């Protein structure tokens, strides 16, 4: 990664995953079980292919994601979270909760309703599931 803008922990963090695309890729892996380039490309937000490649490369270089050859299709890569990436779960959940609370067009779906009821339990449950998938 290039030199950070400052030594502020918030600024350093945002230099790595602070753009919307990186957070949406992390969301897709964590909460939507997407693992491949084509699955990310087909997300509802419609990320451009050049931006997707860039963000995947940054997240891999920062050791938030690992890229491996698919066991089922040797010409396909599969992305998974590292522990460093999985540690972003509480942040992703907080952003989801905040967005649902303050954006009228962002209704709470099943996960959002669980978060509203007991955020700590949801984070604990999802963390347990992520641990099984961490490389």
Image (tube, helix red, strand yellow):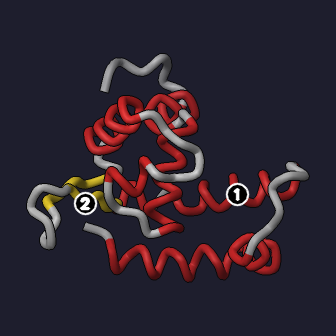
Depth check: give the residue in front, 12 or 45.
45
Q: Label 2: which residue?
A: 78
| Dot 1 alpha-carbon crowd within 10 angstroms: few under 14, some 14 to 19, many 20 or more | some
Mark 2 packing: few (<14 Cα in 10 Å), some, or many (20+)? some
- Residue 58's x, y, as percent? 33, 35
Please tell me which of labels 1 and 2 falls first in the chain. 2
Quadrant for the N terminus in the image? top left
- Left or right placement of residue 76 versus residue 95 in this view: left
Q: Are marks 1 and 2 in contact (CB under 8 Å)?
A: no
Please give the residue where the numbered disc 1 appears in the rendered image. Answer: 96
Name which residue lies at 18% across and 57% down. Answer: 76
The secondary structure type at the circle numbered 2 is strand
Marks 1 and 2, how far apart at CA? 25 Å
Give the percent coordinates (x, y) of residue 100.
81, 58
Q: Which quadrant is home to the C terminus?
A: bottom left
Please provide percent x and percent y for residue 12. 48, 30
**Quick check: 23 left or right of 38?**
right
In the rendered image of this protein, does residue 49 appear above or below residue 99? above
- Coordinates of residue 31 in the picture (x, y in percent): 53, 67
The front one of 59 and 105 is 105
Say which quarter of the image contains residue 16. top left
């Amino acid at each position: 990664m290039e030199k950070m803008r400052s030594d502020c922990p918030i600024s350093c963090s945002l230099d790595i995953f602070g753009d919307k695309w990186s957070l949406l890729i992390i969301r897709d892996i964590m909460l939507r079980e997407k693992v491949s380039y084509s699955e990310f490309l087909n997300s509802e937000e419609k990320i451009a292919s050049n931006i997707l490649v860039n963000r995947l490369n940054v997240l891999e270089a920062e050791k938030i994601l690992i890229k491996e050859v698919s066991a089922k299709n040797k010409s396909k890569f599969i992305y998974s979270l590292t522990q460093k990436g999985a540690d972003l779960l509480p942040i992703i959940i907080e952003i989801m909760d905040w967005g649902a609370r303050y954006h009228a067009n962002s209704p709470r779906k099943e996960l959002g309703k669980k978060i509203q009821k007991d955020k700590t339990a949801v984070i604990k449950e999802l963390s347990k599931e992520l641990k099984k998938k961490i490389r």
